[in-house]
Image: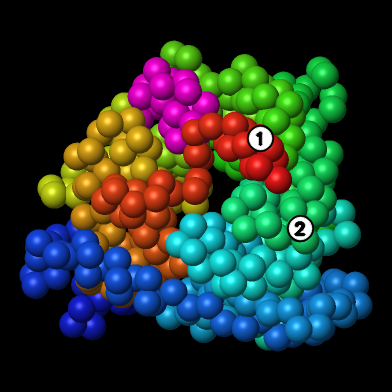
Amino acid sequence: MVATLGCGGGSTRTDWLAPAPGCADDPAALGTAQARARAWLRVVPFTPRVVQGAPPTPPARHLAPTPDTPYAMVLSYPDGPARMRRRSYLYDAALAILWFGSTGEIETARSLANTLILLQNPDGSWGFFFDADGFYNLRYVRNGAVAWAAYALAWLDLRAAHPPARQAAQAAIAYLAAQRVADPGARHAGLLLGGRGRWAVDEERFFPDFELPVAITEHQLDAYQAFSLLAPRLADDLAARVIEVLWLEGAGRFAVAADARAVIDGASLDAAGAWGALWLEARGDVDRARRSLRFTEATFRLPAPGVAAYRPALEGAEPPAPSDLVFVEGSLGVGLAAWRLGDRATARGTLELATRFACHGGPGVPYANAETPDFTTAPAAASTLWFLMLAREATGGEPAPVFVSGLRAQARREEVRR
């Protein structure tokens, strides 16, 4: 398969993993890649005052922006396929708030937060993505993305006193708390369900009545971050259920999900060894974190010299993916977990991976090295922001504001300071 982006009009996936002469092999390559990636990020004004979702849909929603308040959005794939170029995914918006807030660009972070506050659903949730032209399917909700938005807004208020962001985060946390399974006889009791709404594969048809009855491991880790800042008892309760239900002691990793009847023991990169290991390390469960990282190294790492590259799931995943598919954002998550657990070589290997990919298909960091139904070779805000956060932490800068150790202690210190 030939990638659609790259130096010289395209390159094979193997070439993406190879050194890029004059770029990734330059001693100053990491710094250069950081500067170019940061300049590539596109934050634009959010101007729609009416938003419309997918059919069958309720009437258009009229927004009520506050006068003299700036609203902005980060473009998730500004160089990607035409249908995606003006989109902002909720998760990417949350990452952008965290990045710009942690670099001192507070007004940019607040402008991004203001848009999420404007678009929040009455029940405290958000739609999965919105675009610059006013498309916003507020009925397509995924609870992991809602949790990231809640965390970013709560974190921003702690960082820079933005009360509307805190209020929106509190509403989102109330929504997420209500998404926990109440049936004590269900295997996934106490865990959050996945969300609502479903698109057909062609993205032309939408099924608003669909409910995702599965408790996805990633969503639990996401929700814990938000709960840790504003609902610490709820965070502790959720964490206990995550370990009790989803941790596979014999395998040394998290399962991918659970439903009412059983644990779904498939393995995904984020749950097993990227975010899973980060979450465990942040809670001080270092032994499990290291076991999770070892499983990841043995299971997901691709044999690519000079870099640390990881595929997104075990073989047999649906839909099928190339065996050498590289999930760049997930690889950087592994890199951050490795860095915090003392494995500097792996962390630097993921930075080298991102640098090579940015050289071949940047200056933003591409999402993957092959086009599949779920992955694109286009530069992505998510992978670019993870690269920037990891690079800064690994070069002695401020720690990335994700899966931070002592989140609750940080929140309490801020409350006392006020």
Whole-Å distance between the Cαs marked 2 and 1?
16 Å
316 lies above or below 393 = above
Viewer can see residue 125: no
Instruction: Say whether residue 162 is left or right of residue 305.
Output: right
Circle 2: residue type: Pro
Q: Quadrant of the C terminus?
A: top right
Front residue of 27/354: it is 27
The tag earlier along the polypeptide, 2 or 1, is 2
Viewer can see residue 388: yes
Q: Which mark is residue 211?
A: none
Residue 48 quadrant: bottom right
Measured as percent of width and height from the top left, residue 394 is found at: 29, 47
**At numbered mark 2, what does the secondary structure look like: helix, strand or loop?**
helix
**At numbered mark 1, what does the secondary structure look like: helix, strand or loop?**
helix
Among all residues in the image, which is located at the extreme top?
A: 250
**Magenta: predominant secondary structure element?**
helix
Residue beneath the point at 59% across and 32% down: 409
Residue beneath the point at 25% across and 76% down: 6
Instruction: Say whether residue 246 is left or right of residue 127.
Output: left
Measured as percent of width and height from the top left, residue 365 is found at: 35, 66
Q: Which mark is residue 412?
A: 1
Q: Quadrant of the N terminus?
A: bottom left
Instruction: Residue 86: say if magenta.
Output: no
Instruction: Residue 278: say if magenta.
Output: yes
Residue beneath the point at 65% across and 20% down: 240
Q: How many residues crowd around disc 2 within 10 Å: few (fewer than 14), some, or many (20 or more)?
A: some
Q: Which residue is mark 2?
A: 163
Which residues, given as a range, are shown in magenta? 277-293
Circle 1: residue type: Arg
